[in-house]
Image (cartoon, rainbow, N blue to C red):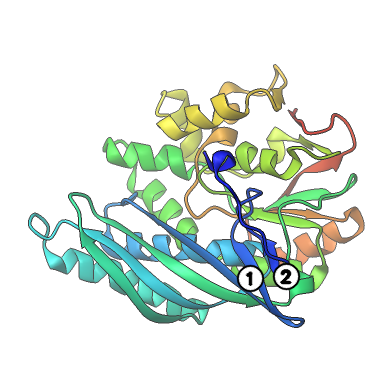
Amino acid sequence: MLSSLPLTTDPNLIAGIERAEDASVYKLTDNLAIIQTLDFFTPIVDDPYDFGQIAAANALSDVYAMGGKPLTAMNIVCFPGQSMDFSILQEVLRGGLDKMREAGVLLVGGHSVEDPELKYGLSVTGIIHPEKVILNSGSRPGDRLILTKPLGTGIISTAIKGEMAGGEAIVKISRSMATLNKKASELMQETGVNASTDVTGFGLLGHAAEMVECTDIGMVISAAAVPFFPEAKELAEMGMLPAGLHRNREFRQDMVTIEQDVPRYLADILFDAQTSGGLLIAVPADRAEALLDRMHREGVAEAAVIGEVVAEPKGKIRVR
């Protein structure tokens, strides 16, 4: 749809809507650029406080994925005031505010509308040095791919709606989705990486496809190395698959080859639409082990090397 719109250009626009970047970046001075993003969605867990935390962490993640520092945020609220108690909205906003405080982000305002369905998220502004922006393009052959959070939140969230998810699984994904990508972002900046994106609605393979689309590189992903929530395996095998997963597979099927010995449930998880997922980072091979070790020592416990960037086939992903 965006391809049919007349795009505006500006010499200070570092990242806009011309590529599938995580956020926009605009240079203000030689030493300062602003990052802008927004995201909001309907509840994916039942607890309103947890939902607020997750929605805030998800919106902030775009800034972290580009190596930036989020500074301010504004609430985006859609609320059915005639049918839902305002105490629920209060808990949602409290969860979001607590997560912003954890991130060192200042809430400066927002906007709300009456809506039949509850929705919440943030508009976020951050800062970065113009020469230190980390784009989702820029990967080089030989780079190792690091994923910082386990997959499967979409499948388990679908099970929550169907009242088929166990309490332990709900706690696990709520904790993961509410975890900021701040530490992982800081460590990748200190290490020096070639590209980064956060894994959200397009799933791991969808966002990986954005990193190689129309480029001279490809990717090889080792399915067995990808971290995922064990409960997602059982649910996927039961057929508890969200619609977003099927859309992701259909949209990127021409770019992705999955070898026959990869289990079907695992192929499903690789396409699963995530909420507030981890960062997918392309890091030079000689820095990968050190970055992974630091992540494990400093609390990014689930981070794993899941594959590498290759020269051939160009613009394609092979899952083995």
The crowding category of the residue bearing disc 2, from other C-alpha atoms within 10 Å (few below 14, some 14 to 19, many at least 20), is some
172 sits left or right of 46 in the view:
right
Identified at 37% across, 49% down, the residue is: 170
Disc ID at residue 212 = none
Q: Position of residue 165 (x, y in %)?
A: 34, 40
Q: Position of residue 51 (x, y in %)?
A: 34, 59
**Residue topped by disc 2:** 187
Residue that lies at the very extreme toward the top in this rendered image: 260
Nearer the observer, 309 or 148: 309
- Marks 1/2 in contact by CB < 8 Å: the verdict is yes
**Residue topped by disc 1:** 183
Is 177 placed above or below 241 here? Answer: below
238 sits left or right of 22 in the view:
left
Identified at 35% across, 78% down, the residue is: 109
Q: Position of residue 66 (x, y in %)?
A: 67, 64
**Residue 179 in sight:** no
How far apart are the alpha carbons under marks 1 and 2?
A: 6 Å
Is 37 placed above or below 154 here? Answer: below
Which residue type carries mark 2? Leu
Which residue type carries mark 1? Lys
* Quadrant of res 148: bottom right
